[in-house]
Amino acid sequence: MPTFEFDSLTSDGRKTAGTIEADSHCQAQQQLAGMCLCVNSLTECRKAKPFRKVGRDEFLLFNQQLASIAKAGIPLERGLRELAGDVDSPRMRRRINEIATELESGAPIEKAFGAHSSGFPELYGQILKAGVQSGQLAEMLTSLNRHVEMGRRAKRMIVEAVTYPAFILVLAAVIMSFCIANMDSVEAMYADMGMEHLPAFTRLVLSLGRHVADAWIGVGLFAGACVALAVCLNVTGAGRRFKERLLLKMPVLGRLLQRSLLSRLADGMRLLVGAGCDLPTCIRLSAAATGSGILQNECEPFARALEEGEDIASAGRQCRMIPPLFVYSAHIGAQRNELECHLANLSCMYEQQAQGNLARLHSLLMPIMLIIVAAIMTLCIVALLMPLMSLINSVQG
């Protein structure tokens, strides 16, 4: 169906612009007239390219502004028009205007945002629908912002957990390479002193010093191969799951990743339960929102079992990644009609555990790296001093 771009005036004289789909130019004019818009220009445009994903910062700002408008009691479609005029990004402005146009034409809110699901989070339309129906749109949007912030904190923890060891390792390698590479001058000094036969350990360390550059080239090639492999694995869903499975099996880091995913899963379920979604939908959407392919695969049979009539405790037994405590707490919460509260407690608990794992990772790595660096530097010093000690002994003898 062709898409038409329009500029118009509302009944109260405000300028508005956007796009509308219609079979013909005449039908587009009729649709706009039905929305009480006075059309200034109407042109057919080419099929718009798919929108890229909204950045997290951009989405948080948009969501906060929308929450403020909802709190002020302004109708959603009018509020979106006002927001569009205040957005710097042309892509975002066009997206908001198109959503507002669909709402003004009578489309349900979840359908209007669902048409732009590639731009907004998957659960966004459901949250807005629940907020409008319950009259608590501002509260739901504020709660969603907290959920997105939690996801940001979780990803930052994982990135920090991966980059911190790498930084310490590179720093240690640079220090050791500097010590070993500067031993050529020591070898020349001993040669000037007439010491042709050096101890075996000293010769070994000096030989290593001559190959430091080659070693760094090898390290660079290995690091480049790892990055290329990670990029290739991200291309397919199976590759992403394989990479995630490797990370989950790593000591300390795997536990941190699991706790982070569980925290985001619980918080997403809490948000959707508060929005009035049924539990299977809550589980599916929350698992998808974590971005974990493994967790999505785990949660799909869980959701299907609930749809078939099983209780939470029975349905959750088949999940290996979700701990029994998570399932049992959700089961008790559902029985007591306190599911939202129990999920909030689980989310908080797993986030604290993830932070504890990150702190433990830091506390373990730093001493280990310092001991390794100190040990290698000590061996270098010993290797340097051994010929000197031999010389002193021979002079004394």
Image (tube, helix red, strand yellow):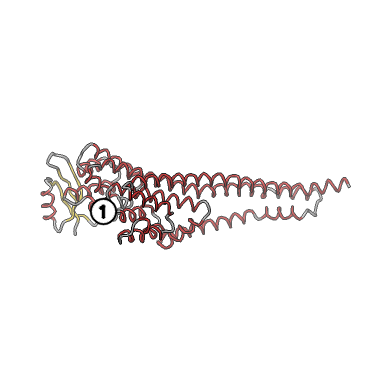
Mark 1 packing: few (<14 Cα in 10 Å), some, or many (20+)?
Answer: some
Whether residue 92 is situated above or below residue 219 in the rendered picture: above
Expressed as whole percent of the image width and height from the top left, the position of residue 354 reads 46, 47
Q: Which residue is mark 1?
A: 114
Q: Assign the N terminus to one quadrant of the image.
A: bottom left
- Out of 374 and 48, give the one closest to the viewer: 374
Judge from the rendering whether residue 144 lies leftward or rightward of residue 377; answer left or right. left
Residue 338: give x, y in percent of width and height. 33, 46
Residue farthest to the top, as pictured: 72
> Residue at point 64% right, 46% down?
371
Secondary structure beneath dot 1 equals helix
Please name the residue shown 54% across and 49% down the image. Answer: 165
Where residue 303 appears, x then y in whole percent? 33, 58
Which three-letter amino acid code belongs to the residue tagged 1? Answer: Gly
Give the image quarter of residue 68: top left
Depth order, front residue of 336/287: 336
Image-quadrant location for residue 87: top left
Against 314, residue 275 (above or below) is above
**Residue at x-position 26% and y-position 47%:** 128
* Residue 344: % across, % down: 37, 45
On the rendered structure, is 307 left or right of 363? left
